[in-house]
Every structure is written in structure tokens, then in C-alpha cells.
Amino acid sequence: MAVREAKPNLSHAQVSELVRRLYCLTDSEIHPLPSYEDQNFFVSVSEGGEYVLKVMNSTDSQNPTLLELQTHAMNFLLQRGLPAQTAIPTKTGVLMSLEEIDCGFGPRKYLVRLLTYLPGTIIAKIPSSPAILYEVGKMAATMDNGFQEMEHPNLSVLQRDTFNGGLAQIPLLEKWLSAIDGDPMQQVVKEIIAQFKAEVVPKMANFRKCINHGDFNDQNILVMQDDQSQYKISGILDFGDMSSGYYIFELAITIMHMMIESTTPVDVGGHVLAGYESVFPLNEAERDCLFLLVLCRFSQLLVLARYAVLQQPENEEYLALWYSRPGIKYLSLLWELGKQEVERTWFECAKMYSDQH
């Protein structure tokens, strides 16, 4: 099936019908929300309440066990006091429903969930500051630590060995390097992949394992101002990239994404690292690989987003978030500065936090 046929394309009338039939609710407002592979809608209902209707793509809808586990993880975090969404049961009491819908290319089956709507602004839209970056790092580690306590009979489905978005799969990028033919960064990405094989793979035995959110990015973190006008995290979104991984993977992914919106990108890593280590201090092997893993995440998103645009040209505006000028510019900047210089900036900044405590 072509990628663009896997993504749902429901009309407002189809969304309204689903909400009424599955949840016995009457919509008063519907508008689309950004999404890459799935389709998300904000839904306000006349009975009172605001929700997100999430319609999974037809490919992922074939793996209900994984989606059920993601839903379980959201509820688990919420019960532990973290600001995650929770799924609303249908009128028959299930948390997701497999629906056959025709979006214009024949009937396909899509898993549908109605999630609570979390208030706030995505962190990409507020000025970056050391305080909020520290909070992001702290939240990432708190989430990873929380997942260590999560129980579920199907946790093994998170061993996603062929999942392209996982940092363990960096060598798979070689298959899609042609998507950046002609880009001067192609040679840099090749060298980063080679360094991953030579320097990260041998040390992975010393990385501490955990379940990763896997996409703790500037579009998936909501913030709100408190009474002192300080920004606090009010929502954690999109658990679609959850997988078994390592603490250091979560941290590297988080640092990379927080850099995208910053005017001082090199400084970002130190503040996020300090927040993360306030909950979960890194060991020597993890610290030694952090810089390269951040480069790997930049490379991964550059290659996969460019490849996806070739498959889904209609999604270019959304995908451009991941291969836009800042992303390429910051990857190039880190590469030119080098491991020693960037690590010095990050580790000295993080040490300042620990010295204050």
C-alpha cells in the first residue's frame, strides 16, 4: 500500500458521525490538528468537554496490541501525576475501535481513539529559556523512570527491532541516503553512521535500559504559565514512537529537538542534561556517547523526512519541520565544533546546576 493511502483523510462529516455513534456525543466544533502519519481532530462537544479524536493510519491500525499498550502507558503516567492524555471509553466500554472508513481510496480499517484534550501551548511557540529546558530534561527522566514500574502482559511488543525511528536503527539510514543526494550534508551523515557503528555499538552493553517515549520533541510538549508567569509542562503528547531503548537515547532525542527552536542551540544541551541528571545521572559510557547520539538524531530526521517527502509531497509543510534550515544548520554547527568543544559546553553547564544543589 502506498504511504499516502495509509494516512487517513476523514471529512468533518465522518468525524462527526464517529463521535456520535461511538461516544454518544454531539460535536459543536471540529478542526484538524497537525499530524504526520495519522489524523487528529480537536473536538468540542455540546454536552461539555474538549477532546482529541485520533485516527491511526491503516498500517499501524494492523497492530492493535502496540496501540493498546501506548494507551495503557498514557493512563499509567497520568496515574503517577504526569500530564498525559487518557482515552475515553466508547459506549461499549473499549478504549479504541477498529472502524472501516472510505477516505477516497476504498474502504480501509483505522483504529480510532478519543483522548482528553490537554490545555497549553506547544513548547515550540514560546521563548526558550534555561528554566524550561531544565524542566524538559527533568520530565524526560521522570517519565523514563516511571516506565520502569509499568506492568503489562504485552510489554514485549516494544522490542521494535525494525522501527525506523529508533536510535538503535541508525545503520538502517544507509538504505535511504539517496533521498539526500546532492546535499552537502550527505557525506557528514555517512560519517556519523560510521561513527555510530564504531563508537556507540560497542558501548551499548553499558547503557541502562528503559522504555522510551521516543519522540519528546518541541511539538509534543505543552506548557502553560503559572501564577508567577513561569512556564510549566502541562502536557506530554504522542506516544506513537514508544519502544524499548535506553535512558541515553531519550536524552539525546530530547536535546536535539529542543535545539531546533533555540537561538543559542549549542547551550541547550547543558540545561536539558542538568534537568535529566537531577533525576537520573549518566554513567561514563552514556556521557561519552551523548554528543554523537544527538548528531545521529539530527541525521535520522533529515534523511527520513526527505525520504518521506518523496513519498508524501502533500505533507511537505509538516515534514519540513524536521529537515528545515535550522536542523541542517545546527547539525553542521555541531559537526564543525566537534565533540570536545560541545561536550565542554554541555558538561560545564550541567556541573553548574549540580554545584548549586
Image (spheres, rainbow, N blue to C red):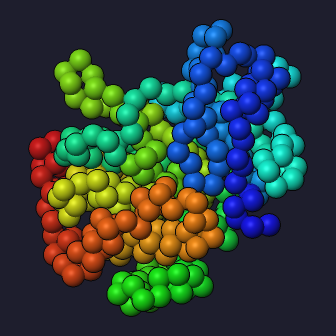
Image quadrant for the C terminus? top left
Is the residue 151 above or below the residue 17 in the image? below
Indicate left or right for 73 with 145 as reference: right
- The residue at the point 37 percent across, 34 percent down is 121
Residue 316 seen in the current view: yes
Q: Position of residue 38 (x, y in %)?
A: 65, 49
Foreground of the two, 184 or 29: 29
Is the residue 328 above or below the residue 19 in the image? below
Q: Please identify the quarter of the rendering in which residue 129 is found.
A: top left
- The residue at the point 32 percent across, 42 percent down is 125
Residue 147 seen in the current view: no
- The residue at the point 57 percent across, 66 percent down is 313
Q: Position of residue 40 (x, y in %)?
A: 61, 40
Q: Position of residue 217 (x, y in %)?
A: 42, 51
Is the residue 212 above or below the residue 23 in the image? below
Image quadrant for the N terminus? bottom right
Q: Please identify the quarter of the rendering in which residue 114 is found.
A: top right
Q: How many marks?
A: 0
Indicate left or right for 342 with 96 as reference: left
Foreground of the two, 189 or 274: 189
Indicate left or right for 203 with 69 as reference: left
Q: Position of residue 77 (x, y in %)?
A: 54, 35
Is the residue 347 above or below the residue 191 in the image? above
